[in-house]
Image (cartoon, rainbow, N blue to C red):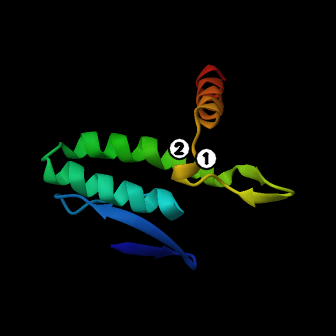
Amino acid sequence: MTTVLLGTERMTLRLRSGAYIPLPPGEWGLIAKEWGRSLLADNKSENTIRIYMHALRQLGEWASAQTTPQGKSVAAGYAPAEMTASVMRAYMRRCLKDIRG
């Protein structure tokens, strides 16, 4: 199911209980939805799925908000296939900074 909020499309994943979990934007949301369906098919608990989807949504939102150099221009965001070890390290530094305050 796709939920529309304030004129922007936001994907969600429907759990067995009928609750909906918001997914990250763009390609990140497509991957999250596929993974979420796989977790449901594997009969994972809803709490486990919520935690996994929350972590992926945080990563996807952060990655989509970054600016990436592409030649002489700058494109918005990292797609999942563009994630490198150095980009993941930058994300982890941001997470640790948030935790430490």
Which residue is rendered at x = 32% and y = 46% of the image? 50
Please state if 46 lies on the left or on the right of 27 as rendered: left
The residue that disc 2 covers is 59
Please state if 39 lies on the left or on the right of 32 as rendered: left
Q: Position of residue 98 (x, y in %)?
A: 63, 29
Q: Are marks 2 and 1 in contact (CB under 8 Å)?
A: yes
Q: Quadrant of the N terminus?
A: bottom left
The residue that disc 1 covers is 62
Which residue is rendered at x = 57% and y = 55% of the image? 79
Q: Position of residue 99 (x, y in %)?
A: 58, 24
Foreground residue among 31 and 50: 31
Q: Position of residue 53 (x, y in %)?
A: 38, 47
Using the image, determine if residue 62 lies above or below residue 90: below
Say if residue 21 shows up in the picture: no
- Which residue extends farthest top? 100
Which residue is rendered at x = 47% and y = 49% of the image? 57
- Which residue extends farthest front? 71
Which residue is rendered at x = 47% and y = 76% of the image? 4
Within 10 Å of disc 2 (Cα), the crowding (few <14, some 14-19, many 20+) is some
Give residue 49's quadrant in the image: top left
| Distance between mark 2 and mark 1 Cα atoms | 5 Å
Q: Position of residue 76 (x, y in %)?
A: 71, 58
Amino acid identity at mark 1: Trp
Say if residue 53 shows up in the picture: yes
- Which residue extends farthest right? 72
At mark 2, the secondary structure is helix
Foreground residue among 58 and 70: 70
Amino acid identity at mark 2: Leu
